[in-house]
Image (tube, rainbow, N blue to C red):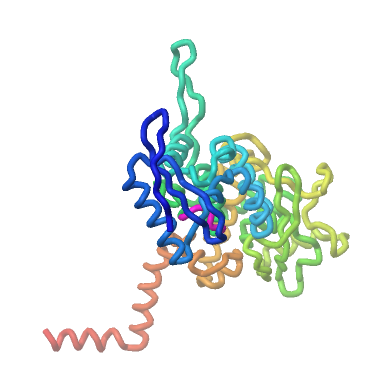
Amino acid sequence: MANISRYETAKGVRWRVRYRKPDGTQTDKRGFRRKLDAETWAAKHVTVAKAEGTFIDPQAGRITVGELADAWLDKKRMSVKPSYYDDLEGAWHRWVEPAWGDVPVSMVSREQAQQWVTTISRGRVGEDNGKRIVIEKPKSASVVLRAHGVLAGILDDAVADRRIHDNPVRKLELPRKVKRGHTYLNAWQLDSLGMQCEGQRRTLILTLGLTGMRWGECIGLTVGDIDFDHRRISVDKSATQVQRHIIVGTPKTWEIRSITYPIQLEKLLRLQCQGKPDHALVFEDPSTVDGYVHQPHSPKAGDNWFSRACDAAEVPRMTIHDLRHTAASLLVSAGANVKAVQHQLGHKSAAMTLDVYADLFDDDLDSLGEELGRMLVRGNVGKMWADGVSRAA
């Protein structure tokens, strides 16, 4: 049972709700301007909540977002890949902690969170000696969504721990990622690109473009991973670069798989592995501390060996990851079905493959219709239908 009482403040009359928590201790909630507001709050948050077992101690909501962040980040460290965890930790320190680190979880409002998200998305401007200047440039949808995801995840934990009733950050309007088109090279363009790369880089580029392996999976390959007798490659690890350091773990989707490679790669791969023990890296860079080949930065934004090769081969400047799209395109052109492409690329599901490469399979519809027509003609089915239509007319 809650008790409503009146008290005086410098700003006028206020109302207080005194009540006992489920553990028997007494507390109160102050600051209501009207008695009706106090009674309504007491009925909802004390009387009904106790009866339904949904009571939340207001004191529990005083813990700050920053105090819960460490536990949330530790949880994520166990469940996500190191590279993604690095992104989450960076978003926390760059965007979430400065704005919300000292704010009690019960004080996070939807309105303030929406303003915060909008500010990151649109950037901030100010004045310097009367001149309008850009304080913070607008950020991409990916940056905004990641920052929002960190704050929302921390508050999800606060809800689960019954520190707050619900998560106001889950009700925001968020920017949408713009899905850019993929860059696909045909077989001749891929060969030309490989020819513009020197030494092992040629084999590396062709392996990426013909097998669809991710960069980390490819540079993490050891000689023993290649079965030359059956032209198979075992993909059971990935060498991921995190803050200039290579961390070796499982592939992105945690799925160990065996993939195929075309015979045209046979000689190049054999030369690359010649004289090396099974545990040695297929692709090595003696100039790096760890011996791994480090991925070149995006050629769209700078100049490096891969961007120069793109220019010399007269193909569009692309990212290394775009070679994976080329592999998908070549696989589909060779007649591979969705499940085969999914397995080769290491996608979690065939639905994901269709979502990412819907345009490739759409291109097959015309040829599929033509082949279906030829099949029906061979079976004399089309003529029978045509005759039926003639008779019906």
Q: Residue at x 78, y 62 (%)?
A: 270
Residue found at x 56% / y 51%: 60
Q: Position of residue 345 (x, y in %)?
A: 60, 64
Name the quarter where the N terminus is drawn: bottom left
Answer left or right for 24 relative to 169: right
Task: Please tell me how many numbered marks the rendered image carries.
Answer: 0
Left or right of residue 297: residue 161:
left
Q: Quadrant of the image for the C terminus?
A: bottom left
Is residue 66 rendered to the left or right of residue 42? Answer: right
Q: Nearer the viewer, residue 29 or 124?
A: 29
Q: Quadrant of residue 157?
A: bottom right
The residue lying toward the viewer, choosing from 163 and 335, is 163
Q: Which residues are magenta?
A: 161-165
The x and y percentages for residue 240 are 70, 52
At which x and y percent is residue 242? 70, 47
Res. 326 visible in picture: no
